[in-house]
Image (cartoon, grey):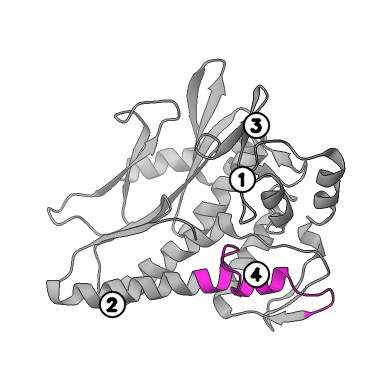
Amino acid sequence: MGTSWSVKLIASASQLQRLERGIQARLDEVVAQMSTWQADSDISRYNHAPSGSVHALPAEFAQVLAAALALAADTDGAYDPSIGPLTDLWGFGPAGACAHTPATHTLAQARERVDWRRLRFDAAQRTLLQPGGTYLDLSSIAKGYGVDRVADWLLAQDVADCLIEVGGELRAHGRKPDGSQWRVAVEQPGGGDDEAAAVIALDGLAIATSGDYRRYFDAGERRYSHTLDPRSGAPIDNAVASVTVLHQHCMQADALATALTVLGAHAGIAYANRRNLAALFVLREGDRFVTRTTPGFVACQRAA
């Protein structure tokens, strides 16, 4: 997935090698199915398949796609798993980086290929039609799913105390060896190493953050974020610097953080409150950053 993973856990030394192999195997499976960076992955084969072809999906791929499509419908396209053409066009996908904005006609052509409603997915049969030109990109949800896969497998191995991280998305269970909680700091955009927007204790919870300040490129006097709005076809241009979501499942936290970032401050906070989501927004106000938290996020803080 073009990133690293780390796991902290409590187990006997004799188990560690087996556990490491098991963790890697679960993540390798996610990559083999859902990485657009791998030419022979299931998703890459689908993306390059001819129009009218029907593809049988592995169960894991189908589960992630079903969740992505449900969120696309619920956000009216602010989240869209068919965003791949735009990801590549703006230089944030496997096609490589770019240092300039796309031409108007090129952007218009890419936007015609982005629409989650074009996907014909049969969840019961786990089949997906390639309507022609569709390019799935599950980067905003597959990392979180990978975290869940590892966490669920470790729990099944009777590893009750663990902290799993893949590309900055995390999920934790149990306690540290000294009995204290697994505590995670939410980065403060523009802050120093010792500054945090919040510190969260995790036990049976996942946390994911989407921000516009880590991956971007500058062209002219403007900075273009890697978070793209599938409705406009362009990088987001709103007051949101980052969104952090807490959820039982990292797959959901991962995708929701992206969706809320795209929705923006007003619509994003309203959506999070309607869905009783635990979310923290870091917003730009002039030359400073301010935080806004949902009641669900505050409740999680108090419970910890």
In the image: residue 9, left or right of residue 190: left
Q: Which residue is mark 2?
A: 157
Residue at the image point whose x is 14% and y is 77% from the top: 14
Name the kind of residue labelled 1 in the image.
Answer: Ala
- What is the C-alpha distance between the residues marked 2 and 3? 43 Å
**Where does residue 220 sit, x and y in percent of width and height?**
68, 24
* Boundaries of the magenta span: 31-53
- Decide: is 115 above or below 233: below
Q: Nearer the viewer, mark 2 or mark 3?
A: 2
- Decide: is 251 above or below 25: above
Name the kind of residue labelled 2 in the image.
Answer: Gln
Q: Is residue 52 magenta?
A: yes
- Decide: is 135 above or below 246: below
Q: Is residue 178 magenta?
A: no
Which corner quadrant of the image does residue 263 belong to? top right
Q: Which residue is mark 4?
A: 44
Q: Look at the numbered disc 3 and give the secondary structure of its residue.
A: helix
Name the kind of residue labelled 4 in the image.
Answer: Ser
Residue at the image point whose x is 64% and y is 59% from the top: 137
Precedes in sequence: disc 1 or disc 3: 1
Q: Which residue is mark 3?
A: 266
- What is the C-alpha distance between the residues marked 2 and 4? 32 Å
Crowding around mark 1 (Cα neighbors within 10 Å: few <14, some 14 to 19, many 20+) is some
In the image: residue 61, left or right of residue 173: right
- What is the C-alpha distance between the residues marked 3 and 4? 36 Å
Crowding around mark 3 (Cα neighbors within 10 Å: few <14, some 14 to 19, many 20+) is few
Q: Nearer the viewer, mark 4 or mark 1?
A: 1
Q: Nearer the viewer, mark 3 or mark 4?
A: 4
**Where does residue 51 sit, x and y in percent of width and height?**
84, 73
Crowding around mark 4 (Cα neighbors within 10 Å: few <14, some 14 to 19, many 20+) is many
